Amino acid sequence: MTQDARFEDGGDRPLNLGALDGEDLQVLSTLAQDAVFPASEMQWLPSERRFAVLINRFRWEDLKSAELRKRSVERVQCLLVVDNVQSVASQGVERGDADTILSLLAISFEAGEDAEGSVILTLAGDGAIRLKVEALDVALKDVTRPYLAPSKNTPSHPE
């Protein structure tokens, strides 16, 4: 009999996850929710059909441990990479401005014909980035050690 993995099973190891379908993408979206990044950290590489962004991800998987040990919450720098990208469009985003800080609320997939569709990065403040893809292939990989969240607060979304 097999058992699903739990957050606790990951310990303090860096995340390195991929999504090839909508269910997988929901997991990545949950882990990347409330990530912040300067607009200048987004890069579209048309010749490689790749879109990448370096985000400062809130470590949701560590929240229980931080609360139990009464220590500050953490963030980690993480690469969010989308492959098979055919085009990129944005709304409400000042691209390339290092002073513009964006907050990622969700990552979703709108299916099209066959495997095609669009990966949507929904941002706070009514911003969005649409990545038209030939097939869903998204990766989320921690690239630094965790660090104390500068705000020392857990992100919240008032109703």
Image (spheres, grey):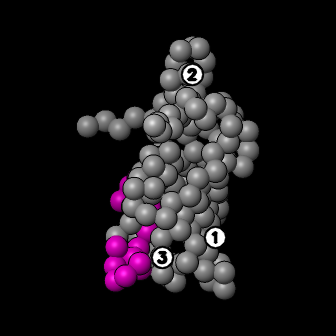
Q: Examine the rendered structure and indicate whether residue 27 appears above or below residue 70.
A: below
Q: Which residue does the numbered mark 1 point to in the structure image? A: 43
Report the disc number at residue 66. 2
> Residue at coordinates 64% horizontally, 50% vertically from top-left?
16
Q: Where, by quadrant of the figure, is residue 126 drawn?
A: bottom left
- Quadrant assignment, res 156: top left
Relative side of 86 to 42, left or right: left
Q: Nearer the viewer, mark 3 or mark 2?
A: 3
Dot 2, how many residues are within 10 Å of its Cα: few (below 14), some (14-19), or many (20+)? some
Residue 44 percent coordinates (x, y): 61, 75
Instruction: Indicate whether 5 appears above or below 126.
Output: above
- Please tell me which residue is depicted at 67% across the width and 48% down the height of the picture: 142
> Which numbered marker is on residue 135?
3
How far is mark 2 from mark 1, CA to CA? Answer: 33 Å
Regarding mark 1 in the picture, which secondary structure is present there?
strand
> Would you say residue 128 sits in the magenta stretch?
yes
Residue at figure coordinates x 34%, y 79% from the top left: 112
Residue 15 image point, x, y percent: 63, 45
